[in-house]
Amino acid sequence: MLNELPNINLSNLDKITIANSHGDYNVSQFIYKNDNKIQVVLDYITSKKMPVVLELFRSFIFKDPKSKNGIIDIDNLIEYIRHFTKYYNLNKYDIEYMGYIYY
């Protein structure tokens, strides 16, 4: 299916960041400290190597109120990515392919 998408250069797809990830985070799997920072993630059975941006985009879709209606608010997504990159570096290929990897 990816090779059917128009105007997408797939030659750099191998340059996206792959890392261990949980795969299905949700709020009920976190234990927080008193300062509201996550201290522990529970239920790591589904952990595997996957594109980092898959987890990022998936968590954005579940968090952003507008996404519940199937709308991707680009400004909210950009802000979410800015916050994410305070803790984890992404490369230009991660950003370029993020939407395609998610869909």
Image (cartoon, rainbow, N blue to C red):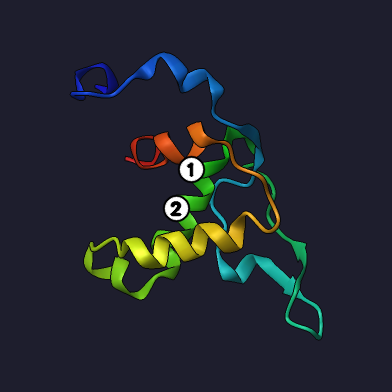
Q: Residue furthest top?
A: 11
Instruction: Identify the residue at image location x=33%, y=19%.
Output: 9
Pick whichever, 87 or 27, lies toward us: 87
Q: Position of residue 35 (x, y in %)?
A: 79, 84
In this view, which residue lies farthest toward the bottom?
A: 34
Q: Are marks 1 and 2 in contact (CB under 8 Å)?
A: yes
Q: Please identify the quarter of the rendering in which residue 40 is found.
A: bottom right
In this rendering, the answer to whether 14 lies above or below 72 is above
Q: Amino acid at mark 1?
A: Leu
Mark 2: few, some, or many residues within 10 Å (few <14, many ≥20)?
some
Left or right, residue 47 beside residue 78? right
Residue 57: give x, y in percent of width and height.
45, 51
Q: What secondary structure is marked by label 2?
A: helix
Labelled disc at residue 58: 2
Q: Position of residue 83 (x, y in %)?
A: 59, 63
Task: Determine whether the residue tagged by mark 1 lies in a helix, strand or loop.
Answer: helix
Q: Looking at the image, which is closer to me, 15 or 2?
A: 15
Left or right: residue 17 versus residue 38 is left
In the rendered image, the quadrant that contains the C terminus is top left
Q: Which mark is residue 54?
A: 1
